Image (cartoon, rainbow, N blue to C red):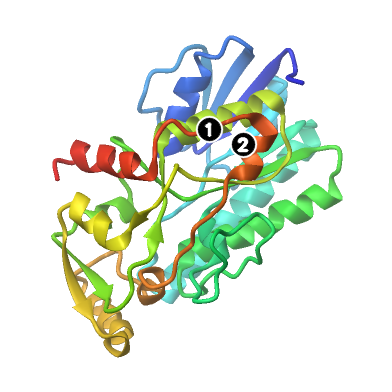
Amino acid sequence: MAEPSKVVAVTGASGYIGARLLKHLGEEKELERLVAVDIHPLPLPVHDVTVYTRDVTSPIDDALGHHQVTTLVHLAFTSRQGRSRKEVRDIRQANLKALHSVLNSCVRVKVNHVLYLSSHTVYGAHPDNPVPLTEDSPLRPLQNFPYGYDKYLCDQVLQTFAEQHPNVRVTILRPCVVLGPSADNDYTRGLLQPWLLAVKGHNPSFQFLHEDDLVRAMSVIIRLGLPGVFNVAGVGEVSYREMTEIIKSKLVDLPSALAAPAARIVRGLGMRRDSIASWPDLVRYPMVINSDKLEQATGYRPWYSSKEALTAFATAKGT
């Protein structure tokens, strides 16, 4: 049963998902107030929102307490790929520090509900992955894929926090790749390269979630105050080779034995910023997730298929 009045705070509010979530929530009549926290200004106008320009690695008790925040959506996360081991380590420490700081503020101010945006990459790309992966599947992130491993570490922190603070409802949402007309990050820029590497004999399935569907899913969870761990993906799948046709990238097929050395060489030359040591596994082994648990708990269904989300992105970028 939905609560009659909620005050929602969003960290990372100026980011890709944060800005769209705030705009959507600004149209929700059930919400009493919105609070945005970010070191950057909001890129979109939002109705009736209070903005705090703040680094969330420091306490935000005053912002949460002053407005009597009931729900905290934590989106502040550095997804940029580090170019050195030190940079990777620094980004990881900053992400974990921000999460711990925000959770501590929530406890002190008595926030009722915390929603965290994790990722399907916490399951890892492995040859023995079940298809599909459920919320009960083991978490086996690729250690040489910093984004997925950082999400995994944060995911673990949230699960421990939920056990230690049973009075706080904790929701962990694990979406597949989020795409749409507004998508613009390291991953999406990588997709727009004129060529992409493939491994001969492999054509894994990919899932994509339209940015509007993710916002809708988060809004439903906020409205219901629903705790738990939930996968979320668009309807259907797109094969790797079909994906490259839609975004009009050419494929360079490599034998399995050459895939890892090629990824290291390309990254070392600086030719592809998104090239990482885990690339050969990511384009060989599927990470297909099942979203039935979320649908059964909320009735939520995505409006867009994986192919439609990918096509919307490709069309907006002129490919």
Q: Amino acid at mark 2?
A: Glu
As displayed, is residue 248 above or below residue 272? above
Q: Is residue 10 left or right of residue 17?
A: right
Task: Spot the residue most to the top.
Answer: 29
Q: Quadrant of residue 272?
A: bottom left
Q: Is residue 13 visible?
A: no
Give the mark nearer the N terminus: 2 vs 1.
2
Of the 4 image quadrants, the one containing the N terminus is: top right
Residue lying at 53% horizontally and 54% vertically, measured from the top left = 289
- In the depicted view, which residue is nearer to us: 248 or 45? 248
Distance between the Cα atoms at labels 2 and 1?
6 Å
Residues packed near mark 2 inside 10 Å, few (<14), some (14 to 19) or many (20 plus)? some
Q: Is residue 228 left or right of residue 260?
A: right
Q: Callout 1: 10 Å neighbours few (<14), some, many (20+)?
A: some
Image coords of residue 95 (percent x, y): 55, 55
* Quadrant housing residue 227: top right
Residue at x 66% of width, y 54% of height? 135
Which residue is denoted by mark 2 in the rendering? 295
Q: Which mark is residue 100?
A: none
Describe residue 14's horizontal placement relative to residue 260 as left or right: right
Estimate the x, y position of residue 47 in percent, counting from the top left: 47, 12
Placement of 205 over or under 230, stated as above or below: below
Residue 216: give x, y in percent of width and height: 51, 28
Dot 2: what SS?
Answer: helix
Query: Is 182 placed above or below 5 here?
Result: below
- Does 266 sit above or below residue 124? below
Inspect the image, locate mark 1, and give the three-letter code of the amino acid beneath it.
Arg
Residue positioned 54% across, 57% down in the render: 94
Label 2 close to label 1 by CB (< 8 Å): yes
Image position, residue 29 (x, y; %): 58, 9
Find disc 1 in the rendering and name its residue.
Answer: 301
